Amino acid sequence: MTNVENAWLIALYPLLSAVLIMFFTHKSRKISMGISIAAVAIGFIHSLLLFFNFHGHEAYEANFNWIKAGDFHLEIGLLVDQLGIGMLLTVTLVSLLVQIYTHGYMDEDKGYTRFYSYLSLFTFSMLGLVISTNLFQMYFFWELVGVCSFLLIGFWWHKPSAAHACKKAFVTNRVGDAGFLIGLIMLYAFTKDFWSVDIATMSFTKIQEAINFAIANNGLEVVGLVSVTTIGILIFMGAMAKSAQFPLHIWLPDAMEGPTPISALIHAATMVAAGVYLMVRVFPICEITGSGALSFIAWIGGITAIFAATIALTQNDIKKALAYSTCSQLGYMIMSVGLGAPYIAMFHLITHAMFKAMLFLGSGSVILGCHHEQDMREMGGLRKYMPITAITFLIGTLSISGMPFFSGFWSKDMIIAKAYEVSPALFWIGTITALLTAFYMFRIYFKTFEGEYRGHAHPHEQPLAVTAPLMVLAIPSVILGLWGSPLMDYPLLKYFNHHFHAHGTGLSFFIHELTQPMGYLPFLAFVFGNLGAYLIYVKGITMQDKAVNVYVKEKFVPLYEGSVNKWYIDEAYEFVISLCMSFFRITWKFFERVVIEGIVINGLAWRGSEFVGEVLKLTQSGKVQSYILIMFLGLIVSVLIFMV
Amino acid sequence: MEFLAEHSLSLQLFVFLITALVIAFSPFNEKQSRITALIGSFIFLFIALLQYFKLFDSSNTAMQLVESIPWIGGINFALGVDGLAFSMVLLMAILMPCVIIASKPIAQKQKPRLYYSLLLFLALAVSAVFMAKDIFVFFLAWELELVPMYFLIAIWGSKNRNYASMKFLLYTFAAGACLLVGLFTLLAYTGFASFDMQELAGIAQALSVPVQTLLFVLISVCFIIKLPSVPFHTWLPDAHVEAPTPISMILAGILLKMGCYGLIRFATEFFPTILENMAPAIAILGAVNIVFGAYTALIQTDFKKIIAYSSISHMGFILLGLAGLNTAGYSGAAFQMFSHGLISAALFMIVGMIYERSHTRELEDFGGLAKVMPRTFFIFKLAAMANLGLPGLSGFVGESLVFYGAFTSAYTGAGLNAIKISTVVSSVSLVLTAAYMLWTNQRVFYGEIHEKNHVLTDARKSEVLVLAVLLGLAILYGVYPNFINSLYEPQLDSLLKTF
């Protein structure tokens, strides 16, 4: 049962669980929860066994024809390789812990079993995405995870804000998906001759060959505007929407309207990282010589990283602040892909999944403890009341801020080091973002857990179902990074990429690196960001007799207001949308009501209808038989007309 | 059994005819009429399933299940189906029982026997359109469909029914007139040598290009009015809004497909050269339909109008698919026909259910209905997802095939880029469709509930059953499209070898 051929079962169990809960066991909370958790637990164990047993350098692949029309054919199948196994483990582990946590978090909710069925459905879709053999199949599951995200954001449908947020999330994602779909259609059209009947269309293992084949045969410019750059950027649009990259990031902060477990699972650890996973899979398309896609990707990632970090500085809603932090970290990953280091992006994806899931679950614990209060101004001093949550949250904060030897340190600094090699501008963006990250993360921590409690509830620690997942996630948040570090000779990166080549390895290399700008600058960023937050939010140092944060707020009004209001991106979108709606209304009215209806038709139709109305009055008094008679008469008349 | 195998198509028509007559001339009440109609439609379905599993061979690209009885003059009462036509017969067989079950509240209002017999006549005429092998039978059936449809809207419709039914009649009549002139001219040019559609197609291809163009335009206008396509689409929203729920279901579900079917059957088989020259124009028309339909749906405030404009938008995909001139585009169009039949019927049914309970279709009267109608909420979400083309549901298959087919169009002239650009522009509908479906969903089901809506009741068992069948099939064909696609793919592939 645990062979590689059966890896599709990992995705199937949660689907069965979702269907079972939805249609059969939704009345029983215990059974539903049990089925859902068991399904993903089996998947996790299965993934672990795959991890230990699958060592082949060749990917395992199986394909089945899904549809065929002439020479067009699409397949659905199963792909198992090291990259996929890494993702399988991450997704099943986080999903398992989040589902356990859900039991504690959603205990009092009426939709408890519905929530579990959606969670299972999401887990299925996400795992289906991970084991996809080809781009088309990935698109298939890509949309399914989107719809699960839609369902879960709008889980509390009676809240108007949630209703708005789920629609916004789906529609924004659709913008990216439209680009993605057109991109893959162009790619298929571009490489059409390569995919003969026995090669699965656009399969990841063959995509490099196909591109080379097409370029050899057709040259780079295909038709007019369509080139490999266009294809790369269009496919990347999908990733931009799903991984909340600027300017399609607007849905992610609003998505925090959903229950916290899904913020952790979907909007921090797994689904939003799918964009990065996609870009790693299609990396061969982007890195073709002559394609400008990579630098576009790198810059979008860099801009998102620093842009979202500046917003996170001033948010008071704990989940919103964490959401912008997710945006920013995803920006790092995307930037890493753009810099030509997809495997480092994967490394950061996995470490980030661990500590960010933990941070979100921690924030959920805080929210529960404060009786559904999300505003950090109503918190403070919670360390005394919620020690486990506080310690795990601190670990997460240290990890994401880049505390040396913690997971986030290794993966993030590796990206910044890569930027140092490739693009100085992006290196500085990365370093400044690291400074901002350390600052805003410690701001969150200090405002929530240190000082005096400012709220009006009675904070309390949460039950084991909530705290246990936090404790479990704390472990990889600290040590997982070592596994990809030079200290241990990069086993994780070598696992993903057999050809991984580093400049050096071991402790001496690490120390040498630290003496270089790319080593000590990010470290200094961590120190100063941390220190700054400490001085402002714990020590409360003053400037001209005012607390520093108040001083900054008053002195730099446009900057502060800009950050609080998310740089008015939502407002800009709303303006454009309202323009479009007016355009739609005007053209519709003009075209339909004035041109077609008013001028052409109405004159005719009204006269006619008056006449026929009269006739109808005569006929409607009749019996059934007379209608039938009329019908047959009509039939005969039409036959006669035809014959004459 | 052998008799059944040899005469299955005419038996199907006969079943509808007999059932309609029995209901019309019997003393049945509503329930008895409905059950009789249901029995008739189940016999039709049974024969269709028999054809699907045994009698019909999809690898055979020729006309099958052929029957021919000499009629008047050189005309034969000839029936036969190929893959495409058969898929439509199958759709008819699936939809009819659903429509009849959904008819209960409408037929209870007045004249149940007349209602059910007209409904069955309508089904008879539409099935005959798809089964016709003789051009005269085709035309007769095409015109015959108009009569029961007119009465069904004019008698059972809502407030503005006279206006809407008249508009429907005029448009369809104009379409029929174009078709009549076109077919008559065609027959005149061929010297009335044959009425058989396949033979005629061969003769038509040999005509001179100007004549072919004239005939193509005449005949195509008829079909794109029926489709309907911009600028001849305005009858559809009115007809839908005024028609009773089951009639809307059958109108969107299968009547519109007569136009698509006609386009593939006549435009492609009779005048392939003209079609090829027209491909860029068709693609642009398709894109206009897709985008205009979608954004018009976005600004409507009447629940039913949104779904009606959504139909127009989705019918645009069929035009776009035809412009591909390749198997992918045509298969996509054919799949879209089938899938839209299931999904739009389900959507119209849901709209009708809510209208029947609340007596309003204005979106601002709704909100928070999820509280009182949780089952309907669940089903509508599923239907909305199917309509916006979510993978795993049938709407996605047709759309993606059409996109690919149109983008890789076999057209070779100077307008090729127009087709490609039309395809890319059409992808905007992915966003627009999601926007109007989910916005509607939000305005109807999410948020706080209105005070007066607390009394609304959730979907009845019979309604859930109908929707479960329609959407269950949408899932089945979305997960494994080959169940339908394999019916017509070989035939379309051989048809399109000519391009």
Image (spheres, coloured by chain):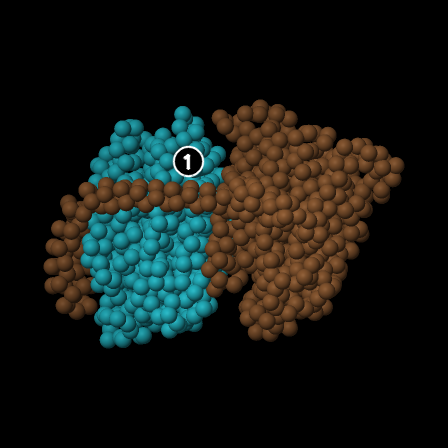
The tally of labels here is 1
Q: What type is the residue that disc 1 sits on?
A: Ser
User: A463 or B8, which lies in front?
Assistant: A463
- Chain ID, brown in image: A
- Chain ID, cyan in image: B
Q: Quadrant of residue A119?
A: bottom right
Give coordinates of residue A553: x percent, y percent: 57, 46
| Residue at mark 1 | B422
Q: Residue at x 14, y 58 (%)?
A: A613
User: B30 or A184, which lies in front?
Assistant: A184
> Would you say A542 lies left or right of B78 here?
right
Give coordinates of residue A172: x percent, y percent: 50, 47
Question: In this orientation, does residue B317 appear?
Answer: no
Give coordinates of residue B489: x percent, y percent: 47, 45
Q: Give the position of the N terminus of chain B as an image quadrant.
A: bottom left
> Would you say B370 lies left or right of A514 here?
left
Q: Give the position of the C terminus of chain B as an image quadrant.
A: top left
Give coordinates of residue B269: x percent, y percent: 36, 39
Vertical relation: B141 (above or below) B105: above
